[in-house]
């Protein structure tokens, strides 16, 4: 009845390692089969350590600064209802709670995909839940390490992952929070979160942080269709959404790069990770890379390039050879999905590009879907539905051609169309189109 009165779309499961702020009887000295009465004395002296009990003090070291395995968690000698000892299944606790939560939500909201966020996970949890990387610090070091943490969980099979933006413990600063909001806008799971009793860190607390957040989130929301397609790739192939450079460019030269982040295969994010910095050294693999904001291109040579990075700006580049579907940003994801598509065609040095788009209803398990392929070569853009029966309502109404010199006329399937073409030093922007994504199309820009 509670959930009938308060409809929900998902659940956030926290402290599910499971965590405990005290050990054993919480200082009550009561028998272990009795539940101690609050208040629990988490600061009570530690109990006598029984070093002969190998389920409390194993004969091997695990780099645990606590005195015994049961510290900060449930008693490792506890017996589950099935007769299994907690010592043997501790790492599965959060995973099994995630499964139970998901089973409930599937029964409660039939044929609706639940959103479940879990702090504790195990191998295979990515099929059930999303994850955040736990209690971090409001520090520049933890801003940096968050990138590698997100990479790790992508490799572990949990593509929807992010860190607590601006830091969980400690009071953040205006500059740190601005830089973290910029990077966090590109985490697959993007959320600012901090501990009770600490200084508030909502972006609107500082004008510069609000500006930086709006600027970065506009890029994220423009890329929602692209990111959604990357999630489907993860479902079908296991590829992470947030990727290290070495994933796309398998060379030892990029193996240690934990300061930049690819979203999918085509969007490169180069954040500032150093206090006081107003520029960033970003490595660009061989090929063309286009600035998201200005469309100016960089010819990458597997070397660092120093980029300007004012406080309210994060550098984002599009990989040459990519076609990236975008939509006009709005205040909500639902509103974004109602907008038509714009294709950003970022050509390679040889003038070609490819991309894809996945569309479904975004809600149900038995949804229809459609995969659509895009390719560009010799001033011709091809649109070709690959699979699926879903009717895509939104059309492609504009193109942004990068690395293309001049354009005056556009024809679709052999018929010249009345549209607007604006040529800038770095791009050709075509508006006023109406390209149906449900059928094959051949668009010539000449």
Image (tube, grey):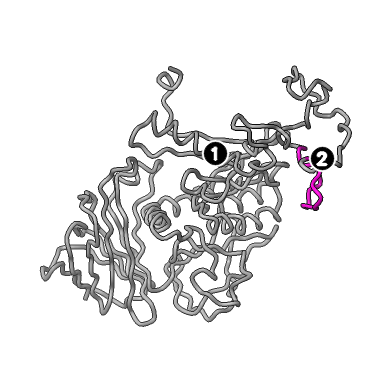
Q: Which residue is mark 1?
A: 96
Chief secondary structure of the magenta portion:
loop
User: Of the residues under marks 1 and 2, which one precedes in the sequence?
Assistant: 2
**Any mark on residue 53, and which?**
2
Can residue 212 be seen in this snapshot? no
- Relative to residue 135, is residue 236 depicted above or below? below
For the residue labelled by badge 1, is the local secondary structure a helix, a strand or a loop? helix
Seen from the viewer's position, the closer of residues 319 and 122 is 122
In the image, is 112 to the left or to the right of 378?
Answer: right
For the residue labelled by badge 2, is the local secondary structure a helix, a strand or a loop? loop
Quarter location, residue 151: bottom right
Quarter location, residue 421: bottom left
Residue at x-position 64% and y-position 39%: 17
Dividing the image into 4 quarters, which one contains the C terminus?
A: bottom left
Can residue 267 be seen in this snapshot? yes
Region of the chain picked out in magenta, as a range? 56-71
Residue 314 on image: x %, y %: 54, 59
- Relative to residue 339, is residue 56 depicted above or below? above
Seen from the viewer's position, the closer of residues 402 and 97 is 97
Quarter location, residue 292: bottom left
- Relative to residue 89, is residue 318 depicted above or below? below
Residue at x-position 80% and y-position 53%: 61
Q: CA distance from mark 1 to mark 2?
A: 26 Å
Are the two marked residues, 1 and 2, in contact with CB atoms closer than 8 angstroms?
A: no
Residues packed near mark 2 inside 10 Å, few (<14), some (14 to 19) or many (20 plus): few
In the image, is 344 to the left or to the right of 418?
Answer: right
Report if residue 64 lies within the magenta region. Answer: yes
Q: Residue furthest left?
A: 415
In the image, is 125 to the left or to the right of 320?
Answer: right
């Amino acid at each position: 009845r509670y959930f009938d009165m308060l409809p929900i779309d998902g659940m956030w499961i926290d402290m599910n390692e499971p965590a405990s702020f005290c050990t054993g009887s919480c200082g009550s000295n009561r028998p272990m089969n009795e539940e101690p009465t609050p208040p629990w004395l988490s600061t009570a002296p530690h109990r006598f350590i029984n070093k002969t009990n190998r389920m409390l003090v194993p004969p091997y070291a695990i780099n645990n600064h606590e005195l015994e395995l049961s510290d900060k968690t449930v008693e490792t000698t506890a017996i589950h209802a099935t007769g299994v000892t907690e010592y043997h299944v501790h790492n599965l606790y959060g995973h099994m709670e995630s499964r139970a939560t998901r089973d409930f939500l599937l029964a409660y909201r039939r044929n609706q995909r639940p959103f479940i966020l879990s702090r504790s996970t195990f191998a295979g949890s990515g099929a059930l839940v999303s994850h955040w990387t736990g209690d971090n610090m409001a520090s520049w070091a933890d801003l940096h390490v968050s990138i590698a943490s997100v990479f790790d969980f992508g490799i572990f099979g949990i593509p929807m992952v992010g860190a607590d933006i601006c830091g969980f413990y400690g009071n953040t600063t205006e500059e740190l929070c601005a830089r973290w909001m910029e990077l966090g806008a590109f985490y697959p799971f993007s959320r600012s979160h901090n501990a009770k009793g600490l200084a508030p860190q909502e972006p609107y607390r500082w004008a510069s942080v609000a500006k930086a957040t709006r600027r970065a989130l506009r890029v994220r929301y423009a890329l929602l269709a692209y990111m959604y397609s990357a999630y489907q790739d993860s479902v079908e192939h296991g590829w992470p959404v947030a990727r290290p450079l070495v994933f796309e460019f398998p060379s030892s030269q990029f193996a240690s790069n934990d300061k930049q982040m690819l979203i999918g295969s085509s969007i490169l994010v180069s954040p500032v990770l150093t206090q006081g910095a107003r520029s960033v050294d970003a490595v660009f693999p061989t090929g063309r890379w286009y600035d998201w904001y200005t469309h100016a291109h960089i010819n990458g040579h597997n070397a660092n390039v120093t980029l300007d990075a004012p406080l309210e700006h994060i550098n984002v580049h599009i990989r040459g050879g990519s076609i990236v579907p975008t939509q006009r940003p709005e205040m909500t994801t639902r509103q974004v999905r109602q907008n038509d598509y714009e294709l950003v065609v970022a050509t390679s040095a040889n003038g070609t590009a490819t991309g894809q788009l996945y569309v479904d209803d975004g809600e149900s398990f038995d949804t229809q879907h459609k995969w659509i392929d895009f390719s560009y070569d010799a001033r011709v853009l091809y649109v070709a539905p690959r699979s699926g029966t879903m009717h895509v309502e939104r059309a492609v109404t504009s193109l942004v051609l990068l690395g293309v010199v001049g354009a005056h006329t556009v024809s679709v399937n052999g018929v010249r169309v009345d549209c607007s073409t604006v040529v800038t030093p770095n791009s050709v922007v075509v508006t006023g189109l109406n390209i149906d994504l449900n059928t094959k199309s051949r668009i010539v820009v000449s």
